Image: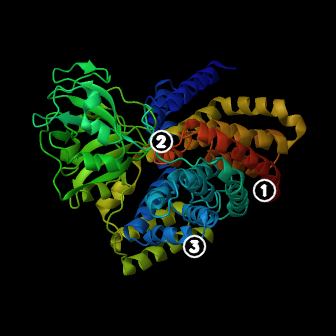
Amino acid sequence: MTFEIGLVFSIIGIAIILFFTEKFTIDTVSIGVMVTFLLTGILNIEEGLAGFSNPATITVAAMFVVSAAIFHTGLLESFTHKLSAQAQKGETYLLLSLMVSAGFLSAFISDTAVVALLMPAVIRLDKTNNIPPSKLLMPLSFGALMGGICTLLGTSTNILVSGIADKAGLPAFGIFEMSLMGLVFFAAGLVYMLTIGRWLTPNRKAKTDLGESVQLGNYLSELVILSEYGQINEPLYKQELFNKFPIKPLQIIRSDGRKVRVYPNTSIQEGDIIRINCDKENLEKIKSTTGIELKADLKWDEENITDEDERLYEALVTPNSFLVNKSIKGMNFKKLYNQVLVIGIRHRSDMLDSLLSRTALRAGDILLLRATEDSIQSIENSEDLLLLSETKQQPIKKLRSILTLVVLALVIGLASFEVFPIVVTAVAGAIALIMLGSLTTEQAYKAIDWKVVLMLAGVLSMGAALQKTGGAELIGASIVDTVGDFGPRAVMSALFALTFLMTNVMSNNATAALLAPIAITIAASLQVDSRPMLMAVTFAASLSFMTPMGYQTNTMIYTPGNYRFSDYIKIGTPLNLLLWLVATIGIPFFFPF
């Protein structure tokens, strides 16, 4: 091993640790890796910055715009309104319809967007059909992930590996080249989720046992005791408020800032902030108690927030939201979102040690908001928060919907018949949709997930560094030496396993960018076609079921579904193993060596 190879391995090793710990955002780490390669001289300027001009990066950015245009027309909202009807036919039929719908949509538009579209409707089935979100949200996420591997456009990972292949002098992937094998994966996963997976999926409703320190489905919120409160200086066990409502006091912060533990004899004093664990419905009732105020997002905000024209809403912090790692107080949430107030947070299943206003938000957190019907529109139009509560249905713009579908068909059709490369049709389609009024230029810029674009540009430097220094060849040779005696199918199977294990603890795109060049090197070493090796990396990088942080959609459903980390291990591990077996048998059949 040369010094340069050792240096590259060290830089990539540190990057993997940072990806796993999530201390910094993935785009920050990716660009940091690229800059490090430039500073150390591993890559020159042209090589280091090549990711920004890579067709894969540009194609992904353009497809974000095309996907957004479809949603802005309101065309896909019909999917959400059919879920209740499917629920009447039984849970099995509902699961089948939900996963097939998510898979079909994800084959052509962002799987994250698909889950964002269907999640609110799935959550509302708990009230309308008594089906808890925990039974449906994991199948929704998994269905979207498996649908995303059925076409080139399904995920950015597919486009990324295709771009790496093209740059290496190999044929780029066709739009539907992955479809047959992708459908085999989808069918196997669907059968699993309707049988074993359905049995393993928790049937978890919000608990009401006040003996638990944290109740699933509840919010951590804060009450302020005003001078009008009728039981000031009386002990907790005599307080009608806590005897009447199923709420659990967790901590009391006195007016002088002292934190007091909660005991039955602890007295309630004027100015106290009482941190409680309570569900949405009872928080709505508590607001009418005289002398009690639900604490808003700003510590100094003394405004009463119990106006009759206001109601409570729930909104999810999306994976790529700029709110991640920011506090409610620090960002001035009320001013940012048109007088909308945060009065509670569900922070997965963890306890929060700091005041709500100072709590750093995480992807997947659910905010309990108080707002008027007009002010909540600022949340509904936000790319950083997904409104889970029911709102007015947006009208479908029929003419724009038809034009948008025509443009999408042309983007796919012209690329499929190789009239133009996908990067050309995607960019042309994005521009056409803006000119046709399907979305504005400003909406197009907001639709592009710049974190993903920057991440792609950065992670491509890892593969370039491995190839230039001979690191890819060294790793490839090690894999071949270990399992090469068993034949190329065994090597491909090992590569698939390595990919899905890595993608469960770090970004799927980073995993693909790291292993795709190695797959090409392995194929050359074995003197076989590189296609099955590349497809193994491509498919496995998106089949992330074993952890909530393995893929964005898994993160999104964590809190709304009341899931635990162990649920992903218990349900996702058998599914990953099943698809590993399917890949070992199927990939060489569709993509011969």
| Residue 79 image point, x, y percent | 49, 69
- Mark 3: few/some/many CA within 10 Å (<14, 14-19, 20+): some
Q: Residue furthest front?
A: 238
Figure check: 328 above or below 232? below
- Asked if the residue at tag 1 contacts the one at tag 3, i.e. Cβ–Cβ closer than 8 Å, the answer is no
Residue 523 in the image: state x and y as whole percent: 77, 43
Q: Which residue is mark 2?
A: 455
Left or right placement of residue 499 versus residue 110 in this view: right
> Which of pointers 3 and 1 lies earlier in the amino acid sequence?
3
Quadrant hosting residue 375: bottom left
Mark 3, secondary structure of its residue: helix
**Amino acid type at mark 3:** Gly
- At 89% across and 35% down in the image, what residue appears? 485
The CA distance from mark 2 to mark 3 is 28 Å
Residue 280 or residue 27, whichever sits in front: 280
Whether residue 509 is visible, yes or no, is yes
Residue 56 is left or right of residue 3, and the answer is left
Instruction: Residue under label 3, please give it.
Output: 413
Residue type marked 2: Met
Q: CA distance from mark 2 to mark 1?
A: 29 Å
Asked which quadrant contains residue 298, the reply is top left
Dot 1 surroundings within 10 Å: few (below 14), some, or many (20 or more)?
some
Callout 2 secondary element: helix
Earlier along the polypeptide chain: callout 2 or callout 3?
Answer: 3
Q: Which residue is mark 1?
A: 591
Q: Amino acid at mark 1?
A: Phe
